[in-house]
Image (cartoon, rainbow, N blue to C red):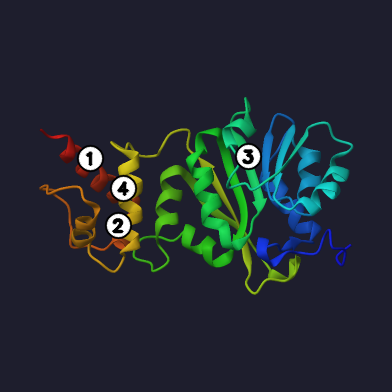
Amino acid sequence: MRGSPAHRPRRSLGQNFLHDENIARKIVRSLSLNRDDAVLEIGPGRGMLTKHLLEESGKLIAVEIDERLIPGLRSIADAHGHFQLITGDFLQIDLDALIGNEDRLKVVGNIPYHITSSIIFRIFEHRKRFESMTLMIQREVAERIIAEPDNKSYGILSVFSRLYADVKILFPVSRNVFTPRPKVNSAVVEWRFFPENRYRLEDEALFIRLVKSLFNQRRKVIRNSIKTMDIGEMDIDFPMHLRPEQLPVTEFVRLSNLIANGRKRP
């Protein structure tokens, strides 16, 4: 099976197939599924997680980009009537159309390292449709996600994760449980989304642009970074001499709201 062209990992897709049943069961247990739960699986691959998700959930929607893997996934699902398998690129599909009337799904996946941030932000954009997200990702990225201010790992993913969810690393995963074996270890991270943002934002689009702009110039102090955002001159009572990695989420929110309110003045 491992040598078959239909199952040989493609480097271009960043495929590292999980082959450890114990890790698969541990991930599925962490979801605390019941028959009322609908699950969205990103990149089911050879179906190591899929078969356990089908046993525990009420509905499973799986999105797989590699057409070679579809026959194997369908054979796993033959005995289950609650399986919807989509062939396509998760970053390109219409998520609202895919989800339909389902609400507050749980997302799970062993995702390619090179598109981790893109997948996370795609889910963030549609977070009101989801209850939680549980992903197996590179350990280094997991540590950035849970990093605190005044830490060199603290960044864009840290801020948005804390704004939208309670987030934590569930457990580390050795690189030895994958085929092919990656060069780095992994970790399983869980986000439990708030029904609404934790803090009130006057202008969420501005907040998103602000956080990304400041961290893209993280060596600059805030005063100098904001000058590149074309938001005009305004008198803001804020410690503009700080750098973005020094700001907790609450301060990003405060700065964004100060700017938004300043722009509203006649």
Q: Quadrant of residue 256?
A: top left
Q: Quadrant of residue 212?
A: bottom left
Residue drawn at x 85%, y 35% is 80
Question: In the rendering, which numbered label is found on residue 260?
Answer: 1
Counting residues from the start of the chain, the first of labels 4 and 1 encountered is 4
31 left or right of 212 in image: right
Query: Badge 3: few (under 14), some or many (20 or more) residues near its Cα, within 10 Å?
Result: many
In space, the residues marked 1 and 2 are separated at their CA atoms by: 18 Å
Q: Are marks 4 and 3 in contact (CB under 8 Å)?
A: no
Quarter of the image that includes the C terminus? top left
Q: Secondary structure at mark 2?
A: loop
In space, the residues marked 2 and 4 are separated at their CA atoms by: 8 Å
Callout 1 amino acid: Ala
Q: Quadrant of residue 264?
A: top left
Residue drawn at x 34%, y 50% is 249
Q: Secondary structure at mark 4?
A: helix
Counting residues from the start of the chain, the first of labels 2 and 3 encountered is 3
Q: Which residue is mark 2?
A: 247
In space, the residues marked 2 and 3 are separated at their CA atoms by: 30 Å
192 vs 41, nearest the viewer: 41
Residue 202 x/y as whole percent: 28, 36
Residue 179 x/y as whole percent: 76, 67
Question: In the rendering, which numbered label is found on residue 106?
Answer: 3
Q: Specify the farthest residue to the top.
A: 101
Callout 4 amino acid: Thr
Residue 243 x/y as whole percent: 26, 63
Quarter of the image that includes the N terminus? bottom right
Callout 3 amino acid: Lys
98 vs 238, nearest the viewer: 98
Nearer to us: label 4 or label 1 = 1
Q: Which residue is mark 4?
A: 250
